[in-house]
Amino acid sequence: MSKLVFLGTSNAVPDVERENTHLVLVGERSTVLIDTGHNPLVRLRQAGVDPLAVSDVFLTHFHPDHASGMPSFLMNNWLLGRRAALDLYGHPVTLRSLNFLMELYSWHNWPDFYPVNFHFLDESHMELALQDGEFRIFSAPVQHMIPAIGLRLEHLPSGMALAYSGDTSPCQAVLDLAHQADVLVHEAGGGGYGHSSAAQAGWSARQAGAHSLRLVHYATQSNIAALVEEAQAEFDGPVAAAVDFEVLEF
Ligand SMILES: [Zn+2]
């Protein structure tokens, strides 16, 4: 059964129960990690997903709460004996920053390191980034403090579509990604620049014609009921605040 697992749902400041927002898509052919939190290896194992099965990683942007676990994940895979290539997707700025960071770790001197393929995503338009026969994954640049992307995951056998906002202010790209989606996974980090409030997440869900809304990237001390109510004031469909290790099945 193909599924999406919330490995973390917190904003930039996690706690014992809630890690930084990151997700894993487990398909029949691909296992796709979306952002990394601080320590994706442990989180994946807790979710019952073999870290070596991860075939692709999308990094939405290069802020520590989304990307700082990547160097450890690359190293952990190597130490676990990974031989298969790992495909990385992101905005060119994100991937160049990661490469620069990995150079500081001298990763080119790590013996027998497996191949890592960088896929630089379009900086201005929505594009089809990955298709494996079961899933199609689209990316589009969204509106954050630094270059950032959002995603649309289409499960071809069921016809289900799921969108993930990444970190963003309300913008047209999110509406395009979430157009008629069964679930919009939207950040609710707060209404400041480059982020969205729960009300703005609800607004985007309504504008996009999404069928349901899951809030992520909300503060650990949030009043969940108030957050959901805020989104519901803007959006008629089902709304919930996602929790760590929650599973959405396709
Ligand atoms: Zn960010």
Image (cartoon, grey):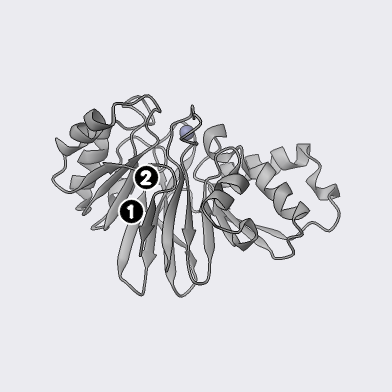
User: At 23% across and 58% down in the image, what residue appears?
Assistant: 180
Q: Which quadrant is home to the N terminus? A: bottom left
Amino acid bearing label 2: Ser
**Label 1 C-beta lies within 8 Å of the nearest ligand 1 atom:** no
Mark 2 vs ligand 1: CB below 8 Å:
no
Q: Is residue 59 left or right of residue 156?
A: right
Q: Which residue is mark 1?
A: 177
Q: Residue at position x 32%, y 61% from top?
A: 161
Where in the figure is residue 25, as x and y percent of width and height? Answer: 47, 58
**Cα distance in 3D space between marks 1 and 2:** 8 Å
Q: Secondary structure at mark 1?
A: helix
Residue at mark 2 = 165
**Nearer the N terminus, badge 1 or badge 2?**
2
Relative to 239, is 223 above or below? above
Q: Secondary structure at mark 2?
A: loop
> Which image quadrant is residue 85 in?
bottom right
In the rendered image, residue 17, in percent from the top left (x then y), is placed at 47, 34
Q: Which mark is residue 1?
A: none
Instruction: Give the quarter of the image for residue 38.
Output: top right
**Image coords of residue 143 (percent x, y):** 39, 37
Q: Is residue 217 left or right of residue 87?
A: left
Front one among 27 and 154: 27
In the image, is 31 to the left or to the right of 98?
A: left
- Neighbour class for label 2 at 10 Å: few (<14), some, many (≥20)? many
Q: Nearer the viewer, residue 60 or 23?
A: 23
In the rendered structure, are the residues bearing label 1 and label 2 in contact, judged by CB atoms less than 8 Å apart? yes
Rendered location of residue 122, percent (x, y)? 49, 53
Residue 138 in view in this figure: no
Residue drawn at x 76%, y 41% is 103
Q: Amino acid at mark 1?
A: Leu
Q: Is residue 145 visible?
A: yes
